[in-house]
């Protein structure tokens, strides 16, 4: 069955799933980003500075700002556009999925480690991407 022929209930289910994922990412990124901005040594959320040794950063200030803006505030913006049923919201959901997945991949490469949260947030990014794709087909 082509995506355009799916039932309206299915579209609603995908929108709800994307909404939950956007809020999950947004709340976590705002909290994490603000924590890193206010405590650039990472101590407030248990991050060691040694994890930055293979990165261009000496502390978590810049990553915290990027996390706060690109995954926090932007997730909330996309969530509100989805709630408004804005014409562009499926593409915004796809973009947020790409941004989150890219963030996680870059973080794993720079930190040279994989943590359980990388898997959870990476999956969140992939699910957002595919959810936005399904929504764009309607």
Image (spheres, rainbow, N blue to C red):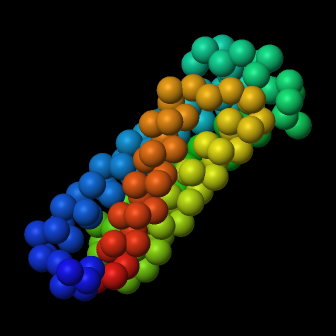
Q: Residue at x 65, y 45 (%)?
A: 105
**Residue at 51% from the left image edge and 60% from the top image edge:** 96
Left or right of residue 135, residue 97 in this image: right
Where in the figure is residue 86, as x and y percent of width and height? Answer: 35, 78
Which residue is at a point 33% across and 57% down the rendered structure image?
A: 18
At x 45%, y 45%, the residue is 123
Tell me if residue 93 comes above or below residue 54 in the rendering.
below
Displayed quadrant of residue 54: top right
Q: Is residue 71 above or below residue 113?
A: below
Q: Is residue 4 left or right of residue 24?
A: left
User: Where is residue 109 shown, x and y percent of the image?
Assistant: 74, 38
Left or right: 78 in relation to 137? right
Residue 20, position as x, y percentages in the image:
30, 49
Closer-to-camera residue (94/24): 94
Quick one: which residue is furthest to the front in this view?
1
Question: Where 92 falls versus 39 (above or below)?
Answer: below
- Is any part of residue 89 visible from this angle? no
Judge by depth and name the residue closer to the eye, 137 or 63: 137
Q: Judge whether residue 108 can be spotted in this image.
A: yes
- Give the left or right position of residue 118, taking residue 65 as reference: left
Q: Nearer the viewer, residue 92 or 86?
A: 92
How many numbered dots are placed on residues in this image?
A: 0
| Quarter placement of the C terminus | bottom left
């Amino acid at each position: 069955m082509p995506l355009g022929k799916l039932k309206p209930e299915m579209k609603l289910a995908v929108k709800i799933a994307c909404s939950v994922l956007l809020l999950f990412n947004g709340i976590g990124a705002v909290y994490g980003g603000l924590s890193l901005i206010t405590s650039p040594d990472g101590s407030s959320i248990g991050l060691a500075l040694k994890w930055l040794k293979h990165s261009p950063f000496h502390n978590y200030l810049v990553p915290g700002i990027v996390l706060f803006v690109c995954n926090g505030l932007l997730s909330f913006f996309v969530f509100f556009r989805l709630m408004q049923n804005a014409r562009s919201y499926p593409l915004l959901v796809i973009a947020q999925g790409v941004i989150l997945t890219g963030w996680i991949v870059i973080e794993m490469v720079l930190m040279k480690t994989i943590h359980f949260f990388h898997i959870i947030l990476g999956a969140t990014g992939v699910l957002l991407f595919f959810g936005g794709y399904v929504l764009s087909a309607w």
